[in-house]
Image (tube, coloured by chain):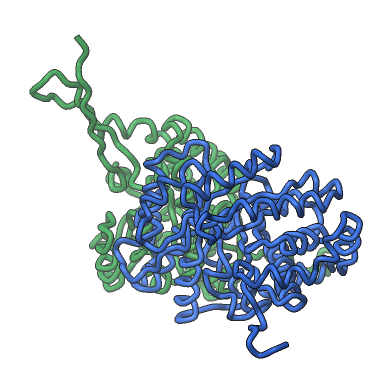
Chain colours: A green, B blue
Amino acid sequence: MSESRLNVLKTYKLFVGGKFPRSESGRVYEVSDAKGNWLANAPLASRKDARDAVVAARKAFGGWSGATAYNRGQVLYRVAEMLEGRREQFVREVADAEGLSKSKAAAVVDSGIDRWVWYAGWTDKIGQIAGAANPVAGPYFNLSTTEPTGVVTVLAPQDSSFLGLISVLAPVIATGNTAVVVTSYEAPLPALSLAEVLATSDVPGGVVNVLSGKASEIAPHLAAHADVNAIDLTGADADLARELEVAAAENLKRVLRPAVTAEDWTAEPGTERLLAFLETKTVWHPIGV
Amino acid sequence: MPQSIPQTVPAHGPDAAARLASMADVTASDAALRRFLHGLPGVDAVGLEGRAAMLGTRSIKTTAKAYAIDLAISMIDLTTLEGADTPGKVRALCAKGVSPDPTDRTTPRVAAICVYPDMVETAKAALAGSGVHVASVATAFPAGRAALPVKLADTADAVAAGADEIDMVIDRGAFLAGRYLSVFEEIKAVKQACAREDGSAAHLKVIFENGELSTYDNIRRASWLAMLAGADFIKTSTGKVAVNATPPGTLLMLEAVRDFRAATGVQVGVKPAGGIRTSKDAIKYLVMVNETLGEEWLTPEWFRFGASSLLNDLLMQRQKLSTGRYSGPDYVTVD
């Protein structure tokens, strides 16, 4: 019985606006494991998929940025719960993608989930460290508070398909931004599975949009897009990053440059990525008599 | 037919009445009108929807797209029909209609600004000398539930205030109850109320509210009924109900206009309104017009879009074509 059973292969799809479309272009590419064995076909996203993703992210921005920080924290914690439930799947995918042993892959997945929880906890605390009650020379309350930047394009790291992805994605959405993620080209499957987790948790559609494909093909359009407010260049090589930063200057996007030396994703992340995509709003309010 | 008489006359021209008189026998009585309207061929719903969907698959790119976008902008009746309309808002909309994209002066103007009758004066003053028309809804828009004298006064007010075009609604209750002649007489009466003292007249657009007519057959009947009564334009919807302009409904009206011209020689315009929000949709409608009626209708004189948010999307697409970068809502006015 089991010998004659046909394999049920999974069709990986993009994640845009809470739905799982195929690429508009109809293209797919072969994804192999670290040893070169075929794993699955992943959609090869096109310029138009990127365009649709930005529209979805913009549409979701009002609701997500307007949700209370506490609520966002709860929603993100729920994602961690769902990740935990799919732990075995992610261990297998990370082991295949990065050529790790099962136990090492399990350690990577565990620290990925822990990192997600860590960022979920920051949602209602980042305001305390980045905001301030400013002393001013007059009878005013002068308060600086944080506001999300807007739609953020994230070029996920090419090497670390799960822990690295979470380390760049979670801080972006924790602070109330919405994200268009371009996955690692060689190892997109953990990211596409993460999309399934997001779709079945309480994250509103469009808050995270996942595109698998070539950063060199999609990212220039996202970097030049006037409705994208910021871009995280972590997954781009030096030449591409330079080209994208030039394109991003057109509408004064916030740009997070890639690290000069390879990043250690297992290290304590710190708040740098949380603060990278925040704006400061300062209000003056007269002190009552 | 003698050479001196042009084969086709515009519905708003002086010769149209004589042509319509040739159809006077079908509008002589309620029974004759019903016989005629119910004698129109039934609509093949599957075929109609299939044809509309098929025409929506044409790929319009590069220079053709640029042309279509500019054409669509020039065909827009930029509309604000809210209870909360203020003179300031109407003036802002007029400024936008005259210069849709202030960063690019090559952007064409819209065809008209569509407002409620009490805002006509404001709009007229704001548009003075620009060539952009003022269209006013009238006849107890959007429900049309008022007595005829009220509707006529509503229309006459708008015309007196300077409206170039009147968008009237038909009495759907009477139409659905089968009292076709009363709908017919009402349209005729409103058409007369569109006349100005100097002998000219405001153009009359007749709104059917397709979403309330429930069947394609009814849309075809309403189209013929309005055209027989002297409509200059037939318009799909008010934009105030759940179902507004749809491609099949509009295609059906385009076909009715084509058949009406073949039968009478009178040329009538079409205006889909409500629910057309993207450039892609607008271009699909233009393809439909070109394929059904031909290039003659591809001017603001014979085809209009009733829309408000469509203009912003067209402008963003226009910016994308000229700069190569995707634009965003931050680069067009919010209204």
Seen at 60% across and 63% down, the residue is A13
- For this rendering, which residue is in front, B52 or B260? B260
Q: Quadrant of residue B95?
A: bottom left
**Would you place residue B156 above or below residue B7 in this image?**
above
Q: Position of residue B60 (x, y in %)?
A: 54, 78
Seen at 87% across and 64% down, the residue is B36
Asked whether, in this view, residue B312 is left or right of residue B277, the answer is: left
Q: Position of residue A87 (x, y in %)?
A: 57, 48
Which quarter of the figure is the N terminus of chain A placed in? bottom right
- For this rendering, which residue is in front, B318 or A248? B318
Name the outermost residue toward the top: A289
Seen at 86% across and 50% down, the residue is B178
**Would you place residue B16 above or below residue A15 in this image?**
below
Seen at 59% across and 48% down, the residue is A199
Asked whether, in this view, residue B244 is left or right of residue A265, the answer is: right
**Would you place residue B5 above or below residue B29 in this image?**
below
Name the outermost residue toward the front: B198
